[in-house]
Each structure stands twice: as C-alpha cells, then as structure tokens.
Image (cartoon, rainbow, N blue to C red):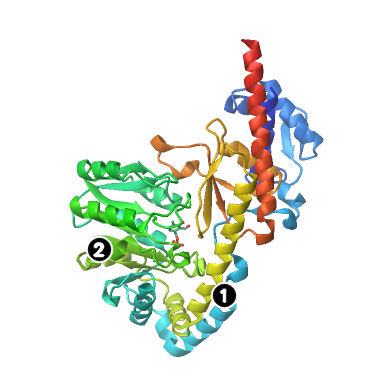
C-alpha cells in the first residue's frame, strides 16, 4: 500500500500547487480516487488521513474532505528553484530601454501605429530585420520577410495552408515543441514522427520517410531543441537539405534560439538553400520580450501571397506599435548590446547546469550537452516515471517539467525530464541538481527495495 498512498498525497499536493484545488475545494471522493489510482479505498483514506495530519485538508463527517489552505502560501519564494519557466530571464529583460523606444516610435510614426497597417509588416522594420538576419547567415530581402504575431502564429498558418509541392503530411521530430503539436492536433493534420535522440536522427530513416509518405514539410528545431537541448552539426543540416531537395519536401526551420549559439561557424539549414525550399522562422520571444508578440518568417516568393491571405484572415496585421518600437530598438544598436549580454548569461548558466549534472546525477541517467540555449533534458532509467519525480521535487520546491506531452502517442516516453535555465537563479542551479539527484536516488532505492521484496515472495 505504501507507494500508492504517497502517490495520491503527491497528486493532491500537485493539484494544490497548480491551483486546480483551492482553499475550500472539496476533494475527490474516496471511491473516485480508488478507481482512478486502481487501489483500495483504505489506501485513499490513509492518504487523506496523512494530509489531514499535515493540516492541508480537513474532513466533514458524511460530506467529504476539504482543502484548508493553498499550498503555495506556505512556500517561501527564496526557497523555490525554478527549472520550469521558459520565458526569458526577468533580470535581463530590457523593458526600461524599450519604453523609450515605444515613446520615440509614437513621436515618429504618430497615428500610423494605431491604425491598420501593412499585412506583411512595417517595411522599415523588415529592412532592419534583413540586416540582422545576416548575422545568422540568413541572406534575404525585405520582400521575402513577413512579420508575424509570434512564431506560433507562423507555425499555425503553415500547418493550415497548402504548399507548392501539393503534398499533405507533416513530419516532426520526436519529441518536439508542444505548441506545434497542439496546432497539428487541433487542425487534425496527418502527422508522422522521426525519433530524435541526443545523438540526432537516423538520416536513412529520414530519406525513407521523405520517399514514401507524401510529406508537405519537415518541422525542425535545429539548435538548442525544445525539449531536448540537441543541436545538429552543419554536416547533418546539409544532408537534411539535400534529402528535402531530392524528395521535394519543404523544411520549416524554427531557429528560436539560434542567436545564442556560441559557435560562430554553426549555420542554419536556410544557408544551404536560400532559394526557397526552407522557410526560416525567427522568434524574438526567448531572446527579447515575448509580450511584444513579434517574430519573423522568411518565405519563398511563390508562397508569399497565399501566406498573407492566411495571415490576414487570422489577425489583419501584427501590432504596429510593437513593430515601430522594435525598429527603433534595432536602429539604435541596443539590440546588439542586449544580445551580447544575454549570450553570456545563458551560456554561463548552462555551463553550471552541465557541470552540476556531470558531478551529481546518478550513473543510470543520461543528459544532453547543449552549449547554450534554454533546455537540457535528462533521460531517467526506463522503470522510473518523470511524472512521479516531478511531484516529489515539487515537494522540495524544485520545479521541472516532464516531457511526455511533447510526443505523438506512438513515440511517447514517460521518463524524460526537461530543465530550463532561463529563469532559475544562477546561484541555485547546483543546489537544484543536488535535490534532483537525491530524489532520483530515493526512487532508485525504492525500486530496488520493491524488486527485492517481489523476489522474496516468489
Ligand atoms: C521551439 C519553439 N518555437 C516557437 C515558440 C513560440 O514562440 P513565440 O512566442 O514566438 O510564438 C516556442 C515557445 O516556447 C518554442 O519553444
């Protein structure tokens, strides 16, 4: 009974922490939970009694169990180690400087920023962006650039619109960015997966899928992958582009963190075929201010009109105020100095995380080795579920994400953890990994104990 009742307690605490249960809420009935967890009613009662002892819930005879107070109230903010949040580090968000740019943009453009504007995006910003993209080895013209309301919008539109190759299916890395999965799920698109591990993808398999499956486009996150933290080599990227050309497949390249790459020699897929096979998307959410809802897409000329029709039907145009202010931010040179600063911040945090994982994680775990970016992923032993570990860590105020929702059902893995370094305080990284290692060791021991007991019962 022991492990199950702890699992139930952890689940209830998790619901309290994420506010699915709040002060005064009635807890699920003993019967409901015993069915849900496939355990006896006594196990549930034991879990509830333990929560009562901790003064988290109370019982009302003949009615049920109720929440006393929300768990988070008892958590000291300083105690929290946040490997979960994936927005940019709040300490390096340049919103004060940006405030000046907003004011200047209004002075300069006046009412133009407050009425409907160019569907493709302000021309003068597109000129700035084309210059900026050159640093990333993306050479193009403002006429091929569209400013979108976040890269999520571009992804959503690309999923829904027809492509010049007339093909129907979408290929994605497995795992992949959850927002993209949501878009294909909601639009009920026919989707295939290809396994991505910390060692990359099987290129022969990719050729096979391209050849046999009517693939419209391959969605790829080539650098600092979400959730894995994996990056492809130039050679691999070149081969993927060659295969795409050979089998008439488009590539949607989501280079959301490419700007952070410390390796100046690393090129985007786009640079291997700038003529139009690769649709390049650059978000400004992770490296700048996500609330602006600004990203840019470089499209082949042949797709431009259709893409703009789809965008128009979605939002007419992206916020002109955000665009005007961003243009001034670029022109003033502030963007480049901001970028220099954050490149160092994230590289350093990632290095500390790597070193801590190397030093502290048990040998039966495997983790990715990104040189920067936001994410590092950890493969737990097969018999351990990331979900259980996440609950256990929450108890210790360490927040991490488990990646099972980032898979198609047929590729699903339950033992993958995603750690984000973006908002965690640099000085707490090592302590967080100590607690993580401790919990993994506890679970390892528990499994061994259960296995030994089972053996004795044989
Ligand atoms: C890989 C990836 N692509 C795209 C996005 C969406 O970003 P945006 O804010 O530009 O819509 C995210 C957000 O987390 C992401 O992780």
Q: Report helix, strand or loop for mark 1.
A: loop
Give neighbour class at mark 2: few <14, some 14-19, many 20+ (Cα, 10 Å).
some
Circle 1 residue: 94
Instruction: Say which label, 1 or 2, has the lower sequence index.
Output: 1
Q: In this view, does 270 lie to the left or right of 360?
A: left
Question: Gap between marks 1 and 2, in whole Å?
Answer: 34 Å
Give neighbour class at mark 1: few <14, some 14-19, many 20+ (Cα, 10 Å).
some
For the point 57% across and 33% down, which residue is it?
384
In the depicted view, which residue is nearer to us: 142 or 58? 142
Tell me residue 250's x, y (percent): 25, 55
Q: Which numbered dot is residue 273?
A: 2
Tell me residue 287's x, y (percent): 50, 67
Tell me residue 219's x, y (percent): 34, 53
| Residue furthest top in the image | 458
For the point 30% across and 65% down, which residue is it?
271
Task: Give the answer, above or below, for where 129 lies relative to 426.
Answer: below
For the point 48% across and 52% down, which residue is it?
229
Mark 2 and mark 1 in contact (Cβ < 8 Å)? no
């Amino acid at each position: 009974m022991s492990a199950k009742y702890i699992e139930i307690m952890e689940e209830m605490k998790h619901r309290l922490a994420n506010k699915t249960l709040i002060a005064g809420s009635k807890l699920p009935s003993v019967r409901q939970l015993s069915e849900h967890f496939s355990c006896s009613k006594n196990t549930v009662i034991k879990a509830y009694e333990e929560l009562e002892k901790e003064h988290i819930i109370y019982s009302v005879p003949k009615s049920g169990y109720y929440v006393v107070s929300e768990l988070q109230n008892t958590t000291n903010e300083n105690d929290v180690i946040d490997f979960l949040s994936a927005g940019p580090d709040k300490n390096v968000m340049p919103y004060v400087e940006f405030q000046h740019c907003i004011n200047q943009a209004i002075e300069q453009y006046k009412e133009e920023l407050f009425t409907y504007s160019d569907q493709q995006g302000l021309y003068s910003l597109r000129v700035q962006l084309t210059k900026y993209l050159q640093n990333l080895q993306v050479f193009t013209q403002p006429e091929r650039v569209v400013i979108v309301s976040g890269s999520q919008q571009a992804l959503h539109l690309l999923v829904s619109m027809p492509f010049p190759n007339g093909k129907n299916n979408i290929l994605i890395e497995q795992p992949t960015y959850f927002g993209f999965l949501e878009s294909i799920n909601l639009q009920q698109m026919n989707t295939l997966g290809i396994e991505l591990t910390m060692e990359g993808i099987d290129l022969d398999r990719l050729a096979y899928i391209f050849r046999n499956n009517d693939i419209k486009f391959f969605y790829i996150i080539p650098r600092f992958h979400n959730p894995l933290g994996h990056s492809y080599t130039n050679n691999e990227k070149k081969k993927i582009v060659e295969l795409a050309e050979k089998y008439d497949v488009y590539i949607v390249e989501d280079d959301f963190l490419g700007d952070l790459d410390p390796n100046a020699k690393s090129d985007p897929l786009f640079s291997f075929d700038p003529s139009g096979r690769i649709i390049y998307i650059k978000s400004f959410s992770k490296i700048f201010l996500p609330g602006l809802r600004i990203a840019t897409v470089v499209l082949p000329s042949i797709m431009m009109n259709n893409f703009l029709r789809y965008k128009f039907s979605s939002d007419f145009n992206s916020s002109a105020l955000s665009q005007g202010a961003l243009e001034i931010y670029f022109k003033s040179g502030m963007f480049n100095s901001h970028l220099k600063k954050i490149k160092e911040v994230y590289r350093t945090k990632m290095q500390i995380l790597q070193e801590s994982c190397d030093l502290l994680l048990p040998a039966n775990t495997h983790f990715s080795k990104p040189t920067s970016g936001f994410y590092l992923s950890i493969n737990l032993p097969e018999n351990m579920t990331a979900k259980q570990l996440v609950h256990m860590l929450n108890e210790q105020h360490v927040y991490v994400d488990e990646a099972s929702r980032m898979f198609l059902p047929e590729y699903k893995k339950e033992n993958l953890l995603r750690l984000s370094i973006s908002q965690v305080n640099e000085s707490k990284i090592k302590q967080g990994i100590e607690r993580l290692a401790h919990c993994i060791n506890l679970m390892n021991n528990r499994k061994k104990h259960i296995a030994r007991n089972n053996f004795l019962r044989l």
